[in-house]
Amino acid sequence: MPAEVLADLDSDLGLNAGTMEVARGDYPAACKRFEAGLAIGEVGSGWRERKAALLNNLGVAYGMRGDHARARDDFGRAAAAQRDLFGPDHPDVATTMLNEGAMVRALAVSEARREP
């Protein structure tokens, strides 16, 4: 089997397995799966779409873990990838930017709670 096909399968596996881990509530395992999918790199067909999905799902998993700063960064990277794919006015870009905004708000709330 060609290396490109294997890379596609490995990246898809990371995306799908990570999504299953999120559904189970195992966010650390989900993060590992999504990161493994991203680590494969730009090989094979459909990489740009998978990259955007992996980054978005990684943001979800880190947000659920309470790591709002990391989630915000991943959502920002996902939105940038989606803008490159679909243009700035696509609904997926808007949804991801809303997710990023929610993490910014969560960070502000966390900071406010820490202040005396």
Image (cartoon, rainbow, N blue to C red):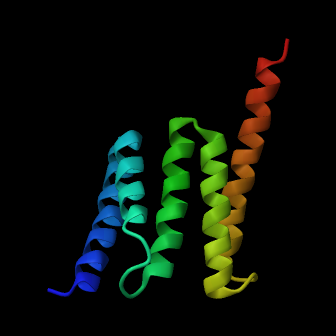
The location of residue 85, given as percent across then percent down, is: 61, 85
The location of residue 95, given as percent across then percent down, is: 66, 67
The location of residue 55, given as percent across then percent down, is: 53, 62
Q: Residue furthest left?
A: 1
Quarter of the image with the N terminus is bottom left
Q: Residue at x 42, y 55 (%)?
A: 35
The location of residue 68, given as percent across then percent down, is: 64, 41
| Towards the viewer: 36 or 72 | 36
Against 78, residue 33 (above or below) is above
Query: How many numbered discs?
Result: 0
Q: Is 56 displayed left or right of 4 in the figure?
A: right
Quarter of the image with the C terminus is top right
Q: Quarter of the image holding residue 78?
A: bottom right
Q: Residue at x 60, y 49 (%)?
A: 71
Q: Is 56 displayed left or right of 47 in the figure?
A: right
Q: Is 80 displayed left or right of 38 in the figure?
A: right
Q: Residue at x 53, y 45 (%)?
A: 62
Q: Quarter of the image holding residue 87?
A: bottom right
Against 88, residue 78 (above or below) is above
Against 28, residue 3 (above or below) is below
Q: Residue at x 60, y 56 (%)?
A: 74
Q: Residue furthest right?
A: 116
Q: Is 95 displayed left or right of 109 in the figure?
A: left
